[in-house]
Amino acid sequence: MTMGNDMSPLFQEVIACMGIPDLEVKKMVYLFLINYARARAEIANLAVNGFEDDVNDPNPLVRAMAIRTMGYIYVERVIESLIDPLRHCLRDRDPYVRKTAAMAVLKLSMFDRSLVEEERFLDMLKDLLADGNPSVVANAVAALTEISERSPHIKLKLNMKIANKLITALNECNEWGQIYILESLMYVVPQDSSDAETIMERIMPRLQHGNSGVVLVAIKVIAYMMNYVSQVDTLEPILRKLSPPL
């Protein structure tokens, strides 16, 4: 398969391997399904029972792989079977499963945006913004941001309470997670000048970050927040701090 050979004739035999309780075998089966399921939709339906077993597996890696793979297979029967497991995985006890489920919501929205709204997955993603795990928060933010950008009528709005929680999670996130979280702050509308100043003050240390992507997004957020500062005198020290990274 990785050498460009068409292995789709083996579809039924590969699906039969879904029941093998070996993580490496499951990885290969899922890779196969992602590559060929859409081309063999009538046979892909046979994998649904295997997915339903795997999303309830005691191993969180198996649960996460199953929900991720289902999100990549745009076959109607598979998508229908994804709804309930996805809802459970968004509340899973393991953070790795929750963060994987957050991105699965994004994949589902690419297939059927109205379904995501009807099943209230957006509300569940917003609940994950208060999750105790920074990786979960970062993935939830990334999913919500992209869904909002792709939709003409879904507009992400964040209040100061959520903004403060997101900023608190910054220190424990990797570079990509920090970029996602900082980008989401562009959806915060400060109620007054003090809100904007608070956000700028809290993200100012990101200007010293070693990753240029983090620095650039931090500058963008600060520039955005400056529009809500009423006192010109307050802006002068901020502008001086922006000079070195620029």
Image (cartoon, rainbow, N blue to C red):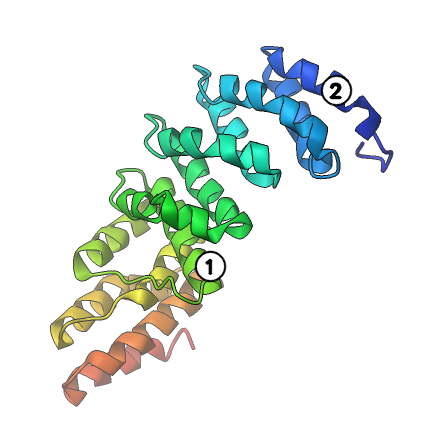
Residue 127 vertical position relative to residue 235 in the rendered view, above or below? above
The residue that label 2 is drawn on is 12
Residue found 36% across the figure and 29% down from its top = 88
The residue that label 1 is drawn on is 211
State left or right for residue 191 relative to residue 8: left
Query: Could you say where residue 39 lies in the image, as x and y percent from the top left?
Result: 75, 38
> Nearer the observer, disc 1 or disc 2?
2
Query: Could you say where residue 4 lies in the image, as x and y percent from the top left?
Result: 85, 38
Quadrant including the C terminus: bottom left
Q: Nearer the viewer, residue 95 or 237?
A: 95
State left or right for residue 142 relative to residue 35: left
Residue found 47% across the figure and 48% down from its top = 106
Residue found 39% across the figure and 65% down from its top = 153
Q: Nearer the viewer, residue 214 or 228?
A: 228
**Secondary structure found at label 2:** helix
Query: Could you say where residue 81 lies in the image, as x and y percent from the top left?
Result: 50, 30
